[in-house]
Amino acid sequence: MSTKRSVTDVLKKNAGALFVAPHFLIFATFFIIPFFYGLVISLYDWHMFFPEMREFVGFANFRRILFETDHIYHEYFINGLKNTFTFVILSVPFLVAIPLMFAILINVEPKGYKVFRGIFFLPSLLSITTLVLIWRWVLNTNVGILNLTLSEVGFDNIPWLAEQPFAWTSLIVMTIWWTIGGNMVIFTASLKEIPQSLYEAAEVDGANIVQKFFSITLPGMRNQLVYITIMTTLASFNVFGQPQLATGGGPSESTKVLMMYIREIAFGGGRPNPGIATAMAICLGVIMIFISVFQSRVIKRLG
Amino acid sequence: MKRWMIVSLVLLSVLTLTACNDNGNDNDDDYLVTITFWNIFTGPDGQEMVNMIDDFNAENEGVYRVNTQTIPANDFYDKLNTVVPQGQGPDVAIMHLDRIARYAQLGLLTSFDDLVEDIELNEEDYISAVWDAGIYDSKRYGIPLDVHPIGLYYNKDILDEYDVEVPTTTAELIAACDILNDPSIDQWCLPLSNVWPSQLLFQASLFQHDGQDMFTDTMYPAYNTQEGYDALNVLHELIYTHGVSPENVTVDEDLAIFRQGRAAFHINGIWMLNGIIDSGVNFGTASIETLFGDTPAIWAGSHNFVMPRPAKVNEDKQEAIMAFISYVSENSLRWANAGQIPANLTVLESQEYLDLPYHSTFANVDHIVFPTISPYFQDSFEPVFSRVTEAMSMGNADIQALLDEAETEGQQRVDEALGN
């Protein structure tokens, strides 16, 4: 009997650890171990298939991609980083503002708002391949629905995926369409938490809609705003599928984002180079950490 | 009671996890040799492959058994990279010809050298170009299943209406297009995609101008030459000087226009055959060996059987693998129906094959040319892809500058890959 009790006691004492264990196992397998393994790889001239040829090179991989300006990997890194930044800067404001706008409209609860909430959320369920296939048939230069419609009203064909600035526009529009639902749901939930009494009080004081939005709504959802802005920025830095499948990195490699280069360098060619690829990934990771810390500080201060 | 349930749940999950790990070999009896086969046929051809495997299994019941898994090509190669070094790869797999040299050099493949003699497959049975292409570093790593060349699809109704013959040279193509282009009814002669498969057209054009894709000694790009310039310039001028194609056609748009019956011609791989039959267009096929230049040459790829390196060699399995490969090769007429050109000559010369409506006219197999077999092909040649796109999407493209850029990038990548 006493053993039975002691087992129960041990279980109870460690209940917290036990609850965390399953998640921790998965987290360790898929995040912590690969993360540190990646750090190690980035310090090596790494051969995936010939362990005996691996050579410790210190920070040579980083020096190469960051400072050796005439090196091909430096050019790839800079071009990839530039394109990734372009995507982040162009996309994040829309990816936050548009779902916010829709959340506010839905929150007014107009007729049929539940249906619209469902419709806006639907694209989030699509896989990236499906998303891009759908949009390609909308945006194709000669057989796309969009150009077909535009030509009815007298426009020339616009190369939506083959020329800038259309290519970026297309990639961003399809990303907005794809991700509107997730952010909108969080915004809608947080809008419900803002006490109605604040709006009533503001109305009594004669505040207009704009004043109410900036003085009550925005500050009221500051935490969610921080969360969404940071998560959206991080997701945008990791962009891969849309340019890979829709533009193939073109035109002239102007939409070839860093993730595409990383994948190619890690796995492609006669001599895959995971050392360089992980070094690039780590540099991107460091940049992302700095930017999200900076963002959260700025937004909190503004609030 | 509750504790008992927890224990059994844990046991159950442990059992499930182990069960996932053993390729399901447990239930087979002792004499049965089971091999795993990974293929990349995700299209309609995949179903035909599965049917062939079922028939093979039925014929060899109790002796051999093939378990197959269909994996999309991109995932397939990433997966091979990770499982083969751990000895967890499949026993036999399908690989594109242009990948074999890389994987052989990385030590991920086993050579067929000791095995091909034991079975009745040899050089005389195959189109010689493709049989030779399976060799890297004087060892055989690939046994060809099929060749998939690019060719010309033409809309019979449109050609009949304008009384135009199928063109075989650039001049004939341009002349035909002058007649067939008709913006008033939204009809195009030959829509050319700037993106996929434009790199295949460029390679075909390069070979037809007697050019080379890469040097086999230095591994450097060989396309920045007069021949390379002419090869790319033809494609550029077809669009911007002769207007055979609308501008800014992107991937699959060329196909869509042809399938809608609004294009007289379409160039694509034979893998598109069933997709074009489905469209209901009344069409024929023709070989393109001199469409861009004077030296007859047709770009082609090939699916090959390869043996990923096993943890330890198992002779029973190797026997089963060879039996399976022979079976599929001898029955590859069925594979032709799935849309490919069999690599096996006996099948190619059979009356049944010649009676197929589209296959034998699609490509003159004597002029099939494969890209250079080298582990560094991708490093050397891939940089030209995006430049081909630029040359075909900009009316004022500077062809020479584009080739210069591609060559420099290719050289740098080769240097890096070789550790120069």
Image (cartoon, rainbow, N blue to C red):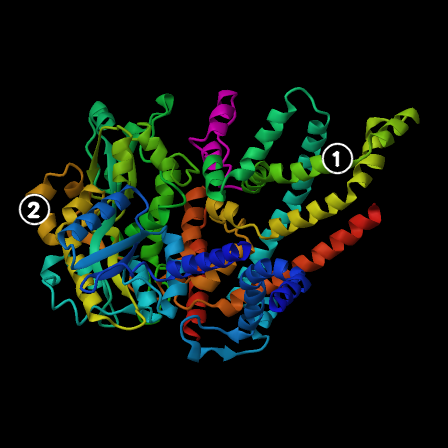
- Answer few, some or many: residues within 10 Å of disc 1's Cα (few below 14, many 20 plus, some between 14 and 19): many
State which mark lies toward you, 2 or 1.
Answer: 1
| Residue B244 is at least partly visible in this image | no
Q: Which residue is depicted at the point 20% across and 40% down?
A: B286
* Residue A158 lies within the magenta run: yes
SS at circle 1: helix
Residue type (three-letter) at the residue carrying disc 2: Ser
Seen as rendered, the residue at the extreme right is A205
- Residue B187 is situated, as x and y percent measured from the top left of the image, at 34, 26
Seen as rendered, the residue at the extreme left is B351
- Residue B190 is situated, as x and y percent measured from the top left of the image, at 32, 35
Q: Which residue is depicted at the point 40% across and 50% down?
A: B388
| Residue B41 is at least partly visible in this image | yes
Seen as rendered, the residue at the extreme front is A1
Please name whichever residue, B14 or B348, is drawn nearer the observer in this view of the structure: B14
Q: Is residue B199 left or right of residue B284?
A: right
SS at circle 2: loop
* Residue A132 lies within the magenta run: no
| A36, above or below A163, in the image | below
Q: Is residue B383 left or right of residue A17?
A: left
Q: Which residues are magenta?
A: A136-164
Q: Which residue is depicted at the point 39% across and 36% down?
A: B253
Q: On what subunit does the disc labeled 1 rest?
A: A
Residue type (three-letter) at the residue carrying disc 1: Leu
Read off the residue under disc 2.
B350
Read off the residue under disc 1.
A191
Q: Which of the numbered marks, if any, corresponds to residue A131?
A: none
